[in-house]
Each structure stands twice: as C-alpha cells, then as structure tokens.
Amino acid sequence: MKLKGFLLAAIAAATYGTNPAFALPLYADGMNANSTLLFRYALGLPILAAMAFYRGRNLRLRASQIFPVTLLGILMAISSLSLFESYNYMNSGVASTLLFLYPVMVAIIMVIGFNEKFKLTTGICLLLMTGGLALLMHPGEGFAVSLTGFLLVMISALTYAVFIVMTNVNRELRGIPTLTLMFYELLAGTLFYILLIPLGFELTVPVHCAGWINLGALAILPTVLSLSCTTMAIQIIGPTPTAIFGALEPVTAVVLSITFLNQPMSAQELFGGVLIVAATSLVVIGNKVDSIILRVRKMFPSLRHGVHRRQD
C-alpha cells in the first residue's frame, strides 16, 4: 500500500514539473502567460466536475465558505501567473527550482504568524537557501538570471506559501471535499484571468493544433493529475513523505528544460538548485533531524566527562 502512495507522490511531483515543457511552446506560438493559464484552468474545470460527480461528490458550498475559497483561487492564480511570466525572463528550470522555496517560506510564516517554535533545522535551511540563491543569482559567464524573473518567482513562491498556510489554518475549508475545493479554486482563477484581459493582458489563442494539445496537457498533467495524485498520496503515506517527493518538481523541470527545450544550465546553477532542494527537504523532515541533533547533543557531555576521567 505504501508503495502505491510513494508512486502517486512521485507522479504528482513529476507531472507538476512539466509546466514549462508545455508552456514555452505556447509562448513561441504567440500566446502570453495570462491566456495560457486561462485556457489551462478553464479546460481543467469540466474534468474536475466529471471526477467529482463520478465519485458522488457535490459541488455545493456554504455561504461562509465562498470568500475563503475565492481567496485561495486568487492566490493560486497569482502564483501560477507569476511563475509563467518568469519563463519570459529566465531559464524555466531555474525558475521551477526557485519556486521550490515555498516550503521554507511556509515554515517562516508559521514561526512569525502562528508562534511556532523556531527550530535549528529551520536556521540550517535558511543558510542552505541563501547559498543556493547566491549561486543562482550569480551564474557563470554566458548565463544570466534576470532580477525581474527572480522577483516574479519569489512572488509565485510566497503566494503559494500563503495558499498552503491558509488551507491548513482556515476552519471553513476543512469540511470541503478535495475535488470540490479544487473545482472552485480553478473557477476563481479562471475568472481572475478573464478580469485581467481588459486591464491590458491581451487574449491570445493557439494558431496551430499542437497549441491546443499543449493546453490540454497543461490542464491534465500539472493541474488535474498532479493535484489528484497529491491528495491520494497524502491519504496513503501522509503529508511529509508526499512533500519530500515534491523535490522531483524542480528536478523534472530542469531535466525537461535541458533535454527538450534546449535551454543551457551551468554546473553552478545546478549546484544552487541542489542546495535549495536540500533546504526544502530538510524543512519537511525537520522533526526527525531535530530529534537526531538532540540525541547527539546529549551524547557530547558524557563523552567529555569520559575524556576528563581518563586524563585524571
């Protein structure tokens, strides 16, 4: 049973990492980020609705649940739009790796906003994260990371972190079935992208059949399939192992950006990405690491006393 959970978690992470593989060809076809996401979310709605009805889930919400669900959808939409816009300014593999800072941001928000104890592992994670960012922001000759692209990814990571925290702490959201919640999040995001069109975000559509195929793939793989597999994996193996497998997200994006999108990446950038993945993975398994550190610290006094006795 656990093997099935690990497989689902791996599929969820890997499929979410396919975002740039389908988005960048659409950009080359003349589409912009807002339109790409508008069609991605809109095409995902009937799929989620069909899944909900097939499983006997209703799509009803209480009046008190409408606002928090709408806010979640807007947060997710802003996170997606910021990430997709960053692809216009920087390597998509690097962007996807930087996005994986969101677990660290979640830890910081919980410490500052919800009085969670600051752990030693959190401090180590912040150091690893800083080192990874430094490497990504100062790549070797021939490589450049745009400040605009970097800021866009940070907005994406931060809004997604707030999205996760709100999902965990808001009482009105706890009783909503997962598919119902996902449906209204995508609906709110779709309406958000529509409202941006008169504000200067031009509506663009695919001009080739391949573009619609890419949009369909975006709706199915990194949206419906990834979110569904994540939910099922959490039910089987729990949130911590599922989140650890999230490290496959930037790895998948980096591999795809190099192999299929012909985007260059230096060894320095790769090492920076490894540090970031290590930092976020440490956040996820922090409790186990903290217990190990405490055991080691308890061992040192006895070891020191033993040395003193031998010297005497």
Image (cartoon, rainbow, N blue to C red):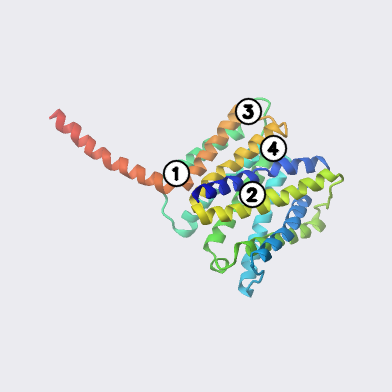
Look at the numbered discs 3 and 2 and tell me whether their residues touch, using CB distance below 8 Å.
no
In the image, residue 263 lies at what x, y percent?
70, 32
Separation of marks 2 and 4 at Cα, in angstroms: 14 Å
State the residue at coordinates (62%, 43%): 14
Specify the amino acid type for callout 2: Ser
Lower sequence index among marks 2 and 4? 4
State the residue at coordinates (63%, 62%): 179
Residue carrying label 1: 123
Residue carrying label 2: 156
Look at the numbered discs 1 and 4 and tell me whether their residues touch, using CB distance below 8 Å.
no
Q: Which mark is residue 266?
A: 3
Separation of marks 3 and 2 at Cα, in angstroms: 24 Å
Specify the amino acid type for callout 4: Met
Q: Which of the pair 169/244 is nearer the observer? A: 244
Lower sequence index among marks 1 and 2? 1
In the image, residue 33 lies at what x, y percent?
76, 48
